[in-house]
Amino acid sequence: MGSDLETEKKKTPVALMPIAKPLAGKKLCKRTLKLVRRASEAKCLKRGVKEVVKSIRRGNKGLCVIAGNISPIDVITHVPILCEESNVPYIYVPSKEDLATAGTTKRPTCCVLVLTKPNKGELSDEVKDKLKSDYDQVVTEVAEATSAMF
């Protein structure tokens, strides 16, 4: 007989959408969620489909991170197409709950857009350099995953 702690540690498998490609592997997913957390702390993050779409249409550049377990699928099917038209890199992560946790919100989040600079105010040089290096590393890995897909 197992204890309650053992059952909590075992996560139930996530039902992914069939369009969730390119899907981040374990390492890339961890780095991406770390980048989302840093961007959230630096106020360089747009959360939710409505904000992300509005920001991309206005011409903001960044990395779009989309959850792979969204239901119904129609909620975000237009986001990857919009990203491709605007030359914005995008990647899927398996869980919307993990994406929300990384973005420091309590509600599950469909997608976030990591911006390269904040909308208001300035960042300190140290925070800006750290965010930029993490962003560049994740974007190059996303580009490799995307090119391997096609």
Image: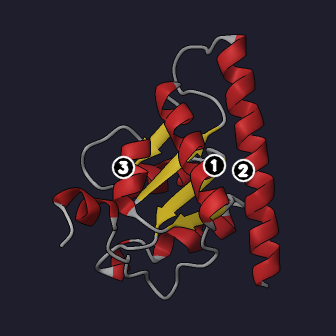
Q: Quadrant of the N terminus?
A: bottom left
Residue at the extreme top: 124
Do callouts 1 and 2 mark residues in contact (Cβ within 8 Å)? yes
CA distance for labels 1 and 2: 7 Å
Q: Where does label 2 land, which residue? A: 138
The mark nearer the N terminus, 1 or 2, is: 1
Image location of residue 111, percent across then percent down: 44, 58
CA distance for labels 1 and 3: 15 Å
Whether residue 48 appears in this view of the structure is no
Q: Crowding at label 3, few (<14), some or many (≥20) Cα neighbours within 10 Å?
A: many
The mark nearer the N terminus, 1 or 3, is: 1
Which three-letter amino acid code belongs to the residue tagged 2? Answer: Val
Q: Where does label 3 land, which residue? A: 100
Left or right of 94, for residue 135: right
The residue at the point 29 percent across, 77 percent down is: 71
Image location of residue 75, percent across then percent down: 34, 73
Report helix, strand or loop for mark 3.
helix
Do callouts 1 and 3 mark residues in contact (Cβ within 8 Å)? no
